Every structure is written in structure tokens, then in C-alpha cells.
Image (tube, coloured by chain):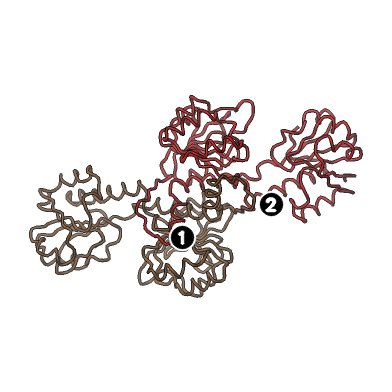
Chain colours: A brown, B red
Amino acid sequence: MKFKKILVTGFSESEMESSYWSRIKNVTDNIEFSSATGNDLVPLLSDVDCLFVKFNEVTKEMIDSAPNLKYISVFSTGYGRIDAEYAKGKKITVCNVPGYSTESVAELVFAVILEHIREIERARKQGREGNYSETGFSATEIKDKAFGVIGLGQIGLRTAEIALGFGADVRYWSRNKKDCSEKIKYANADEVISSSDILSLHLASNSETETFLGPERINNIKKGAVVVNTAPMELLDLDALEDRLKKGDITFILDHSDEMTKEDLKRFSQYDNCIIYPPIGYISKEAGIAKQEIFVSNIENFTKGNPTNSVN
Amino acid sequence: MKFKKILVTGFSESEMESSYWSRIKNVTDNIEFSSATGNDLVPLLSDVDCLFVKFNEVTKEMIDSAPNLKYISVFSTGYGRIDAEYAKGKKITVCNVPGYSTESVAELVFAVILEHIREIERARKQGREGNYSETGFSATEIKDKAFGVIGLGQIGLRTAEIALGFGADVRYWSRNKKDCSEKIKYANADEVISSSDILSLHLASNSETETFLGPERINNIKKGAVVVNTAPMELLDLDALEDRLKKGDITFILDHSDEMTKEDLKRFSQYDNCIIYPPIGYISKEAGIAKQEIFVSNIENFTKGNPTNSVN
């Protein structure tokens, strides 16, 4: 099949390379772009059979005003602002782009751990200033450290595998035991949290995982541990985290500053043992290409009658 | 056996923890420390049967003036300033401390690669300044990159293994093929140098390897490659390296600034694509402990008649 009309909303033409737009043009008679959002899009939807969105909303009202709509293609992993259940009732397929940044995020975990345990920023700065003395630098190794992963999804698994490469003693907790290398050992969450020298958090955010790390678990993090969170900050009780940071006996590193309020960023940035990165986990060039490839493949597969990455 | 008298030269008591000194005291009747070096030590050697040295010289004259000397214990890996052949002729065993910093150096390779390809210093600084925007950051992944290792000794091998954990396509050249994972593929040096996206140098410095990377090989390094040298800079023709850096199409990262002249540091530090670290590769806490443990075990093993890490 071919679409009659694709409406692109929530992102601009420049966010995808022309070769991908060419592939999209092969499966539609017509593409339109709109910078409108939400119900302002209602007047444009009457003849649309395929809708592209990114982080923007798709309401019941929008769906009701698109009688020909068959397919909503989401140019991101998250699709929480789309009423996917309502769409399902109208036999509209919603597909997202999962997993494109798996490697990018997993590699960033090691970039920020190694920066911290090897004092890389300080060393680079000192070298740049022409001071090449190693006096006063200290370092620890990843090898033989207890390396804990909370949440063994795609990113958690790759993080665990890379940690194995470093020779760490890797254990994980996840809602379900996973079929992975036996060197990645399953343990209960409290044990992983209290015994890990390095702890990497990879839980998805949902009603079950909110403040998964509450006061008790945060208090039980091993003294001296380095905790890396490349997952949403909703997983943590922020007041309990602040109390623990005040003790000065853990280091907390995060790259989800985009999901924190200005006030929270301000209060956490005052602790030297809280290292806040811009959200650079997902931004590798390879992730960008994979994202476009998966997005366009989803569309092509739908037109061939084999939808991929459907979420409803 | 027990030594009658150990003379400690080239390093001070504070460079080794007291527990190690206690173990040494168990194998000798007497320890003396001297800050003298070279032939100034001659008058102190007449009754010495064990000599500790670090980077300092042991000359023929010193050996000739130590008629009871049985054992020279070197508190470092390098022993180039010791006349080990002449000592052998006098039936004096020389032992060094190899391999203690294997993990420390191999992990640093990834610390500095990841710093570069993820713009970690810039991201940390920006975060610290309260700017949490990821706009303008770019990144690449290690996964699927051609990762070349020149010199598959202990450090090169661990570097290759960690690169495998990251999912890189790993190839190596070494003087001899090694018995390692078949995923670490052997190739000739020119091929490794010209095809690698990331190239890590791990050759020992000797007359055979001096300027191993001469003008032709340096010119053949792949465009866009990141080259990491945690080995001696003697491996490279510095003028050819400077010419290549001027082209701006490779990045060169080194942590052997301690072995470069002030003039060379100055000329290379002017290139943004040459990142010079202080020599922090070997300094992990674990390496420090391993170094002391190997050194003291060498001594204990010698007294038991089973010398370890003998170099002559």
C-alpha cells in the first residue's frame, strides 16, 4: 500500500537526512509539514492517513477528526503523550523507535565512570595548562569491582557486558531474570544496591518504579560507591538522595538533567559529589542514524503489512 | 636463607607501606637506606648481599665493590640502567616488577578515548556552570569501530579484550602471533595502522621498535582516527607526527609526557588535536598495591631459592 497523505508534526525536515525522506516519499503520494501542535492540528487532519509525531500530543479529538488515519509514526522512544489506547480502538497502529541509543548510553556510562575514577577532567585541564605532573592524582580500577546493574533491559545488558570486558564482578537485578551470560549474576535489588562499588541504574520510569530507590535503599548504598543514573530521576527519592550526598560517602553521576526542575538542578549542583551532565547519553552519530533507520523501516514495514515496533 | 644486609637506594621508606617493610625485615638481619646514587654508593657496598634500586644506576664498578652481592631487586618495571649482564657473570640475580599496572593503563586507554569521543571534559564543565543543554555536542561509539592494537603484551591484550566488550572490531599486530581470543584478529602492522578508527599503541621501547611509526606509517593512519599512545614516545617519528597533526585529520592522545622534552611538549601542545595528559596511566591504587606485593614476593621467593621475575 501507499499512503495518500502524511502529515509531519513535532519535528522539522532538517531532523532527518534527505535519503530517509526519499524512502518515505516512495510510500506516499503527498507529504505536508505543520508546526501546529495539539488540537490546532484538527483542521489539517481530515484527509491524513499517516501522522508523524515526536514528543507532541495526539489527543482523542485529533484522532476523531482524522477518519482516514491508519498509522501514527513516533520519531522517539517515548510515546506517553499519544492516546495509543484510543487509537487502537479506531484500528490505528502506533509505532515508536526503541533501542536506537542503546550503545550510546551504555558507552556513556563508562565515559562518566572513568572520568570520575581517573580524574580525567582535572588531568586534561592540567595538561592543557602545561603542568604534566602526576603528583596528587589518585585512581581506582573497574576490574574486580562489584558492578551492579538495576534494570537489565537493552541498555542495562550492554552496560553489564561492557563491565564484564573490564573484568568487573557483575550482578544485576531486574523484574525478571534474563537469559544472559552466566557471568552476569542475578541478585535481589537490595543486595545489588548495598554491595556494589559501582552501581548503574537502568529502570524505565513508570508507576511501579517511581522512587524505586527510596530513603532506605539510598541509605544502604555502599560507602564509597559510584552511582550512575542514565535513567529518569523519578526512580529516586530526591530528598533522601540529597541527605546521602551530604554525608559525602557516595558519588552520584547523572545525565538526565533535562528532566529535572531548575530548583532541583540548583540544589544538587552544590554537592561536589553530585556530577550533573547535560543529557548527552543518547546523542551519538550512530544512534542518530539508527533512529532514522528504525523510524523509516517502521513506515515501510507498515505499508508492507508487517508493522514493526507497534506499541498498541 | 636470610640476607645479612639490604641496602635501599633510589627510593625512600615512604614509597612502600609498613606491612611490606615488615615482610622484608623477616628475610634480613639488617636494612640500611641511602640517598647516594651511582658510584657514590661504592663505599657502602662491601658487606651488602641485597641491593634495592628503582630508576637508579647499577654500574660494573658498583658490582665489583660488592663481593657479597647475590640479589638486586628493582622497584620498577624498567631496569635499563642496571648492568644486568655483568651482574649475571657475577652470579647476581636481578629481578624487576613487571605487569603491575596492566589494568590501570588499559582502563586509562578507554578513559581518554571516551573523554574525547563523548566530549566529557566540555560536558562536565558546562554542567558545572549550570548549562545543561546538549545542543552542539557530538559523539561517536566504540562499537563496530575498527580498533587496532599495536603490541599485544599484557597491556595491549587487556586493551583488546576491553575493546571486545565494547563490541569493537579488534585487530592487532605484534612481533609474534599470540594465543588469545580468535575475535582479536592478527593482521600486519601496516594494515592495522591504515585501517583502524581507533589505534592503541603498546610497543615496548627498544632498538627494534624505535620510530616504529615513521613518516610513512604515520602518513597512513586512517583519516579521522583517534590514536592513543600509552607507550614510550620513542616509537614515533615526532616530526612526522607533527606534520600529520597539522593536517588536522587525526587525534593523538598520550600520557607519556614525562618522557618528552620541554621543547617537544611545547610544540605538540599547540595542536588542539594532540591531547597530552600527565603520566597517570600507571597510578591506580590497585597498581600501587600490586607493585609492592610483586616486589616483596620477588624477595621472599629469592630467599626460598625460587627467584621470580628474574631478568638476567
Residue B79, above or below B297: above
Discs 1, 2 touching: Cβ within 8 Å: no
Say what secondary structure mark 1 lies in.
helix
Mark 2: few/some/many CA within 10 Å (<14, 14-19, 20+): some
Q: Earlier in the sequence, mark 1 or mark 2?
A: 1
Q: Quadrant of the C terminus of chain A?
A: bottom left
**Residue A21: where, in percent of width, then height?**
20, 46
Q: Which mark is residue A79?
A: none
Residue A218, above or below B1: below
Left or right for B208, reference A190? right
What chain does badge 2 belong to? B
Q: Residue A22 sits in which quadrant?
A: top left
How far, Cα to Cα, is label 1 from label 2? 34 Å
**Residue A292: where, in percent of width, then height?**
27, 49
Mark 1: few/some/many CA within 10 Å (<14, 14-19, 20+): some
Residue A152, above or below B250: below
Q: Which residue is mark 1?
A: B128
**Residue A205: where, in percent of width, then height?**
37, 67
Left or right for B48, reference A32? right
What chain does badge 1 belong to? B
Which is nearer the eye, B154 or B75?
A: B75
Q: Which mark is residue B289?
A: 2
